[in-house]
Amino acid sequence: MSRSKASKRGSARKNTPAAKAPQKKTARARKPREASSAETIAKKQREISVSEFFAKNRHLLGCDNPSKALLTTVKELVDNSLDAADEANIPADVEVRIDELAEDRFLVRCTDNGPGIVARNVPSVFGKLLYGSKFHRLKMSRGQQGIGVSAAGMYGLLTTGKPVKVVSRTSPKKSAQRFEIAIDTQKNQPTVKSQEDTEWDSSHGTQVEIELEASYRKGQHSVDNYIRQISLANPHAQLTYLPPDRSSDADIQVFERVTNELPPETAEIKPHPYGVELGLMMQWLRESTHRNLQGFMSNEFSRVSSRLAGEICDTAGLPRTKKPKAIDQPAAEKLHKAIQKTKIMSPPTDCIAPIGEELLGQAMQSIHPSEFSTAVTRRPAVYRGNPFLVEVSLAFGCDDISAEDSAVMYRYANRVPLQYQQGACAVTKATSSTDWKKYGLQQPRGGMPTGSMVIMVHIASVWVPFTSESKEAIAHYPEIIKEIRLGLQDCGRRLGIHLRRRKREADEAKKRSYIQKYIPQVAVALQEILGFEDKKRDETVEVLTGVLERSRKL
Ligand SMILES: Nc1ncnc2c1ncn2[C@@H]1O[C@H](COP(=O)(O)OP(=O)(O)O)[C@@H](O)[C@H]1O
Ligand SMILES: [Mg+2]
């Protein structure tokens, strides 16, 4: 059959003008293939710098269109400011200012009151990809890869040729320093264009300016929305936003902090044995300075006591005293299997800090006033050995959302809003696979529930499994989806109770108004039947109304 199709296509082509074109022309268009030898190919083989790679693949970083580039830049700057202030136990005060310099040119400036950055590290922080303080640790933070702000700076440099401008001060005793830093993409190294002492009225903090090609939009994916959402998940931070279209001070938006208490401090943890892959474990064994396997196991992993480490060695059939460096691949595989067979306690959970039900509720009410709101903080759970925790908050009957629309979804990872790739996110999967009809809402098959409602889901973890470098969606780990669904169900049940009560009250009110309407008629009818005076008739109306009133109070 395929052959007859092919011949048909062949004969059809003969009739086309192209087919009638002189043979010579087609022959000239095609160059004969040149064979490359391994040697000629070898001349072209060289290392690819990480910044060159991301410059070409900027979509991986969230810079695939001008309005997204603006959002990503703001986001990377604010995330870093909040991370730094939290880590230094300073109640964050962050100002974001955007200026439109030309039609497609913007200047983003972010100023924080954090600890500042020591001068010797400033060039690498802003001019080197994959440089940061958060990648090598298991601790809850907004950034993790070390390609946030340097990538935003690189995008600015590529599109405008302007370096990143940084002012940083680490203490009132030291003067502030101003830098201009560009990234050499071929080498993935910073180039310091200038560095000098400067006057700055803050005693500590960081100010970063990035000029970039971008566009400013309103709507779901907007910077305005991001700022609103980030304040919802960071009730301890004060945010000031100067949007590019401001015409007077009245357009400056200030999101006051809802609480003066900082989020609880989170501990850094060691990896849990259940989550470690074989190859990685082999590398650790090779690099280990421990004298024996038992010591290695109990020191490098969380929840492995010396006794348990011994047990794992026994199960693997390996001597407890064996030198870690001497463990070869087959032995490592035995060890890895033995770990999976051993019952090990879940990792400690003081490494994650939830926002908390009360603050979530307060923040939600201040941003989306509604007739009903509720919040749930789930107990920590574990995926691939990493602890994580889910929080869900729900506001129903919001003034600013139509009842016919799909619920508005806010997704967060470690207090950072995720605004793109909603369809690819574990949160969306969990929400659309929850049966909302049970709670009295409408829901198209396999879709989001309908209603004037905001659903917020926050996932906090020492390592958030994003689906890509741009950190837009959370991977579909079954453990994570399950926890989200349980959180949604908790909130859904409460909403269901509220909706049923609301319906009951509405039904009763309707009945009551109906009865109220007929009470005078009843009294008139009684007067006619029993033949009593008008006074008695009016008294009857009063008595019946009283009975109705009392039934309302009951
Ligand atoms: N505003 C800031 N204040 C203090 N330190 C900062 C600030 N911005 C960035 N840093 C430091 O620079 C590092 C690199 O930042 P970034 O490239 O965004 O990567 P990541 O946030 O993923 O670690 C951070 O890990 C942090 O140590
Ligand atoms: Mg960052």
Image (cartoon, rainbow, N blue to C red):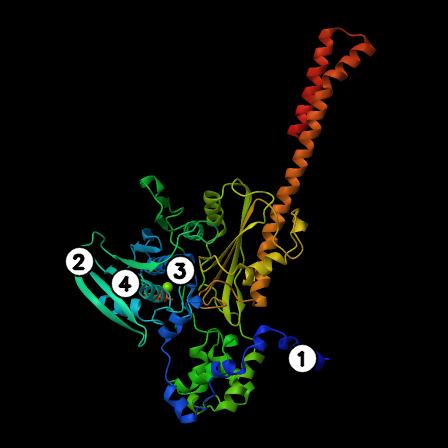
Camera-side mark, 2 or 1: 1
Discs 3, 4 touching: Cβ within 8 Å: no
- In primary-sequence order, the first of circles 2 and 1 is 1
Distance from Cα at disc 3 to Cα at disc 2: 30 Å
Give, as a three-letter code, the residue at label 4: Lys
Please indicate whether residue 350 sits to the left or right of residue 12 in the image. Answer: left
- In primary-sequence order, the first of circles 4 and 2 is 4
- For label 2, the SS is strand
Q: How packed is label 3: few (under 14 Cα within 10 Å), some, or many (20 or more)?
A: many
Location of ligand 1 given as a quarter of the image: bottom left
Distance from Cα at disc 3 to Cα at disc 4: 16 Å
Please indicate whether residue 53 sits to the left or right of residue 405 in the image. Answer: left
Camera-side mark, 4 or 2: 4
Please report the residue visible at 69 percent of the width from the left and 34 percent of the height from the top: 507
Return the x and y of residue 328 as percentages of the image width and height.
47, 91
Q: Which residue is mark 2?
A: 198
- For label 3, the SS is helix
Q: Nearer the viewer, residue 14 or 417?
A: 14
Q: Could you say which quadrant of the image residue 106 lies in?
A: bottom left
